[in-house]
Image (spheres, grey):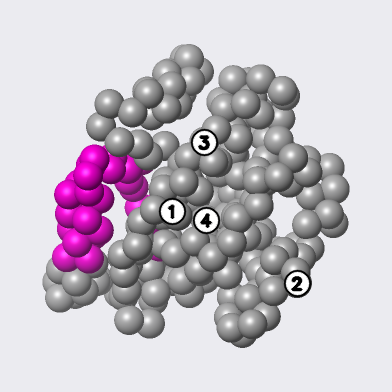
Amino acid sequence: MTSVIEGEDGEAGVQDPAENEDESTGKPRQPSSGSLKDHQLADDGRFSRSNKVIGHGSTKIVYHARDEEEGCDVAWNEVIRGTKEEDEWVIAKFKNEIKFLESLEHPNIITLLFKDVSSKRALFITEMLPGGTLKQFVATSKKKKLQVKVIKKICKQLLFALNYLHTRDPPVVHSDLKCDNIFIDSHNCEVKVGDFGLSGHCGDQLLTGIHQHRLEFVP
């Protein structure tokens, strides 16, 4: 998923249009009507969401939000609803991501702060890093070549995260690790892995089902 925080693709606005296409039709998916108005607050007002889109994927849209208790910016992830058939897969993927974020605790993995998967809404809130995605960070650093020391620091943190996932019992497979799903704090180059919607355990039936759905829409 491309984001803009800093912008998470949606943050600043560097976004691959293809990331927001409906996989079955190739046409842009749109947030459900009212999504900009109905979900302004969460967790009894602790989190307040703005209308600023900082990230956009094929199944979810990410808004800039605030944690009023901690006084910091957070990422508000909300489902993009489509047809009934599409929603079944989208919600399954969404809940799958929440399940893994709840079970994982590591300094190099995005932290889940709140979830709500009631019948009226489907959203979750995570911490937000001020550097956006690694893809954006690298793109903005092209004018000034990244130092080897910085590259090593980033790679080392990613290896820590992967080692944590792969040594779990059972091992966790991310399945969609790419620069769009790696987030970075541009101030100190702290890196965190996110977007666990396609993740699963080795031999996990849900993982198999999710990937089968993706294959059905491959041209």
Relative height, residue 116 to residue 139 (above, below): above
What residue is pinned by disc 1? 101
Q: Do the residues labelled 4 and 2 touch (CB within 8 Å)?
A: no
Q: Does the magenta stretch include residue 161?
A: yes
Identity of the residue drawn at 54% across and 65% down: 113
Q: Does the magenta stretch include residue 54?
A: no
In the image: residue 179, left or right of residue 25: left
Query: What amino acid type is highlighted by mark number 4?
Result: Ser
In front here: 16 or 100?
Answer: 100
Pick whichever of labels 1 and 4 is earlier in the sequence: 4
What residue is pinned by disc 3? 93
- The answer to whether any part of residue 198 appears in the image is yes
Where residue 56 sits in the image (x, y, percent)?
Answer: 59, 49
- Report how far apart the C-alphas of labels 4 and 2 lie in the structure: 25 Å
Marks 1 and 4: which is nearer the front? Answer: 1
Element carrying mark 3 = helix
Q: Residue 186's mark? A: none
Marks 4 and 2: which is nearer the front? Answer: 2
Residue range (magenta) = 155-183
In front here: 76 or 92?
Answer: 92
Pick whichever of labels 1 and 3 is earlier in the sequence: 3
Identity of the residue drawn at 38% across and 29% down: 207
Query: What amino acid type is highlighted by mark number 1?
Result: Leu
What residue is pinned by disc 4? 3
What residue is pinned by disc 2? 45
- Report how far apart the C-alphas of labels 2 and 3 lie in the structure: 26 Å
Query: What amino acid type is highlighted by mark number 2?
Result: Gly
- Report how far apart the C-alphas of labels 1 and 4 lie in the structure: 18 Å
Identity of the residue drawn at 22% across and 65% down: 157
Q: Are marks 2 and 3 in contact (CB under 8 Å)?
A: no
Identity of the residue drawn at 48% across and 74% down: 130
